[in-house]
Image (cartoon, helix red, strand yellow):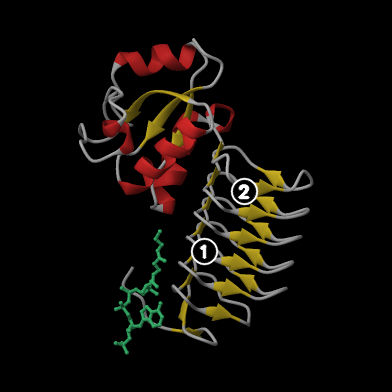
Amino acid sequence: MPERSLILLGAGGHASVVAESAVAAGWNILGYCAAEPSREAGCGALAVPWLGDVDHPKPDLERHLANGARVHAAVGDAKLRERWSARFGVEKLATIVHPGTWISPSAAIAPGVYVGAFAVINATAIIGIGTIVNTGAIIEHGVRVGSYVHCAPRSTLAGLAEVGDRSLIGAGAVVLPFVKVGADAIVGAGAVANRDVEPRATVVGIPAKPVEARV
Ligand SMILES: CC(C)(COP(=O)(O)OP(=O)(O)OC[C@H]1O[C@@H](n2cnc3c(N)ncnc32)[C@H](O)[C@@H]1OP(=O)(O)O)[C@@H](O)C(=O)NCCC(=O)NCCS
């Protein structure tokens, strides 16, 4: 078995992006877990086998794990990503980094993180378990990002900002320097958060203000 063998958890759009990034980074994808076989996923396009549901996998999954394969939860839903990652344990989680990124050598990246194409993670930033730093996202110096966060495409966390666990920083949103976003919060697409965001709050607009969110 090659050293970097991977099983993807999930088969939706995000999984297709992660699958292609993983292949570009030299991972060998052995298969994917999802509720049912998918023709949509990059996994499907790459013609790798379906290994059953995450909670009821086929025996092949255990065999691959015993042979050293890693898993990566490739799903946008933070709580699902957390649950699936926990099922396999941190030591089994693969961090997938698209080769076209800049990650500072002084940054600390936890297991299970995805870093997409054109993303930048600058000096001394810290990224928690299972976080998505999506296409073109910028994480500036000294930023602290919790676990299972999603920094959506082209979002920017300015220097020394902080983001709590499971929060979503929407596409193109900006969190200004020193601003703290609480856990389970949402900063809407295109928003500029210039003040701290309460845990579980949703904020939108420029400057970002709270809004009742359905999601
Ligand atoms: C903020 C967000 C979560 C709200 O979603 P929602 O709960 O479904 O809320 P609604 O779409 O019903 O919008 C509620 C109100 O906020 C406004 N609103 C929603 N998103 C907004 C945004 N990003 N910026 C400004 N206003 C926004 C709506 O126009 C609506 O205003 P109204 O009541 O005056 O009509 C969502 O719009 C968003 O921005 N999600 C980020 C998505 C993203 O970037 N995903 C990454 C994918 S890779």
**Residue 93 badge:** none
Q: Is residue 197 left or right of residue 84?
A: right
Q: Is residue 146 above or below residue 96?
A: below
Q: Are marks 1 and 2 in contact (CB under 8 Å)?
A: no
Image position, residue 43 (x, y; %): 32, 32
Residue assigned mark 1 = 154
- Circle 1 Cα neighbour tier, 10 Å, few/some/many (<14 / 14–19 / ≥20): many
Asked whether mark 1 lies closer than 8 Å to ligand 1, one says no
- Quadrant where the image shows the C terminus: bottom left
* Residue 187, position as x, y percentages in the image: 49, 72
Residue at the spot 74% in from the left edge and 48% down from the top edge:
104
Q: Which residue bears the numbered disc 2?
A: 128
Which of the two discs, 1 and 2, labels the residue nearer the N terminus? Answer: 2
Residue at mark 2: C-beta within 8 A of ligand 1:
no
What is the CA distance from the residue labelled 1 to the residue labelled 2? 19 Å
Q: Tag 2: residue type?
A: Gly
Q: Residue at x 54, y 27 (%)?
A: 92
The tally of labels here is 2
Front residue (pair 175, 135): 135
Find ligand 1 in the image and state its quadrant: bottom left
Q: Tell me the amino acid under the disc marked 1.
A: Arg
Q: Position of residue 80 (x, y in %)?
A: 39, 46
Position of residue 56 relative to residue 168, above or below, is: above
